[in-house]
């Protein structure tokens, strides 16, 4: 009797291993296929990103994909700023009010001890385009 039980048990084990092997064979095959597809997509993505970088590097500034395209590069020269202030006939305090900073900042900019922040350059550029009357009118407000 024990022989029959052992034989039955071994046959059941063999059949179950065979069934499991068939089931896992399909899973392994699909898993390998998915990994292959993922690797292909990663390679394609990397090539597209490098092509985009190359295009962005060679494209003109207005054609580049940026959030906010700068209109023009704004520069600041201390001597030019002092000349502008004197041309408008303004004190450092008055020029500071036009630009939106203190008079002390104007003195530091003109003496070269400090430079204006990039966020302040557009307001300085706007002051360059006004005359004495316009400056006086803005200060009177």
Image (cartoon, rainbow, N blue to C red):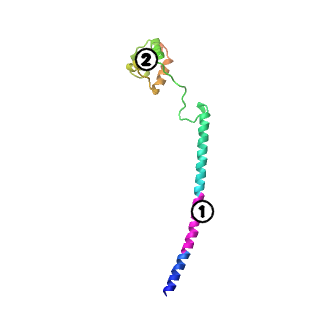
* Residue found at x 40% / y 19%: 108
Residue 25, quarter of the rendered image:
bottom right
- Circle 2 SS class: helix
Q: CA distance from mark 2 to mark 1?
A: 74 Å
Q: Residue furthest bottom?
A: 1
Q: Closest to the observer: 20 or 71?
A: 20
Residue 20 lies in the magenta stretch: yes
Q: Against 134, is 68 above or below? A: below
Q: Earlier in the sequence, mark 2 or mark 1?
A: 1
- On screen, residue 13 above or below 51: below
Looking at the rendered image, the quarter that the C terminus falls into is: top left
Q: Is residue 36 visible?
A: yes
Q: Nearer the viewer, residue 101 or 104?
A: 104
Q: Position of residue 95 (x, y in %)?
A: 42, 17
Residue 45's spot in the image, x, y percent? 59, 46
Quadrant in the picture for residue 62: top right
In this view, 95 is above or below 118:
above
> What span is in magenta?
16-33
- In this image, 55 relative to 116: left or right? right
Which residue was labeled with disc 1?
29
Callout 1: helix, strand or loop?
A: helix
Disc nearest the viewer among 2 and 1: 1
Please give the residue where the numbered disc 2 appears in the rendered image: 110
């Amino acid at each position: 009797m024990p022989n029959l039980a052992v034989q039955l048990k071994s046959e059941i084990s063999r059949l179950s291993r065979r069934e499991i092997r068939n089931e896992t064979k399909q899973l392994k095959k699909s898993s390998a296929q998915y990994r292959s597809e993922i690797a292909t997509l990663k390679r394609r993505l990397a090539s597209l990103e490098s092509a985009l970088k190359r295009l962005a590097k060679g494209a003109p500034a207005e054609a580049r994909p940026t959030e906010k395209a700068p209109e023009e590069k704004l520069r600041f020269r201390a001597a030019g700023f002092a000349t502008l202030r004197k041309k408008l006939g303004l004190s450092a305090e008055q020029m500071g009010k036009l630009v939106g900073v203190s008079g002390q900042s104007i003195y530091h900019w003109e003496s070269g001890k400090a430079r204006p922040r990039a966020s302040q350059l557009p307001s300085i550029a706007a002051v360059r385009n006004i005359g004495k009357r316009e400056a006086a009118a803005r200060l009177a407000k």
